[in-house]
Image (cartoon, rainbow, N blue to C red):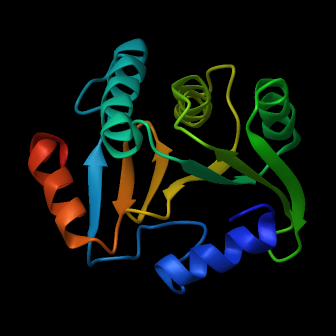
Amino acid sequence: MIVNNVDFEIAFTNAFGDLNRVSLSSIHDNRLRFELAGDLEETQSRIREAIERSTDILTYCFKNREVLLRILLWDDNAVELLEKIINGTDHQAERTRDLESECDMLYVKMKKYDEFIGNYIKELIIHHDMAIEPSANMTCYYINFEIPVVINIYDDRGMDVFSANFEFINDLRLNFLKWIL
């Protein structure tokens, strides 16, 4: 059972090996890259499309499943926004300082995927590069160790999904084929 950041990092290594903990972009096998905002140019349309597509994929992957979030908080604004939203929930959360990246880390364990929290985080990420508030500079991995799967929404343009489970990644590919880059 994962109860703290040390347990989490051990479980992460056991499930995914030496997977990059900041970006999934360098992985080639069993990784899908999805386009979120498409070719839309108008800002609000891009945001709406990115949120709808990422919601569909996150729901497909995590509905009624345990989800762990590993969040690198690159600025103080991210820390404040996330602590406000997570405080008052029954989710386990632990904040630590990552000495290697010199930023705060937030680990959140949800017994079942919480769409409200998941949506709030992805909106902060999508808003960041578009200079729309509220926004936060952070890297968030949405993780389930049973499948196993890791998802990173990197901005309004796209998201990466990695799984060592070929059957799962293939089903995901077939369900969302039109959005794959």
- Residue at position x 71%, y 64% in the image: 2
Please tell me whether residue 56 is drawn above or below residue 42 in the rendered image: below
Q: Can residue 80 be seen in this view?
A: yes
- Residue at position x 79%, y 73% in the image: 6
Q: Where is residue 82 in the image (x, y as percent from the top left)?
A: 77, 34
Q: Position of residue 67 (x, y in %)?
A: 55, 48
Task: Name the quarter where the N terminus is drawn.
Answer: bottom right
Q: Nearer the viewer, residue 52 or 58?
A: 58
- Residue at position x 58%, y 81% in the image: 13
Q: Which of 53 and 110 is in front in this view?
A: 110
Q: Is residue 150 left or right of residue 180?
A: right
Q: In this view, does 34 lie to the left or right of 102?
A: left
The quadrant holding residue 146 is bottom left
Please tell me whether residue 117 is drawn above or below residue 72 in the rendered image: above
Q: Where is residue 98 in the image (x, y as percent from the top left)?
A: 85, 68
Q: Is residue 88 left or right of residue 49?
A: right
Q: Nearer the viewer, residue 5 or 28?
A: 5
Q: Please identify the residue farthest to the front as the structure is shown.
A: 1
The quadrant holding residue 128 is top right
- Residue at position x 48%, y 78% in the image: 16
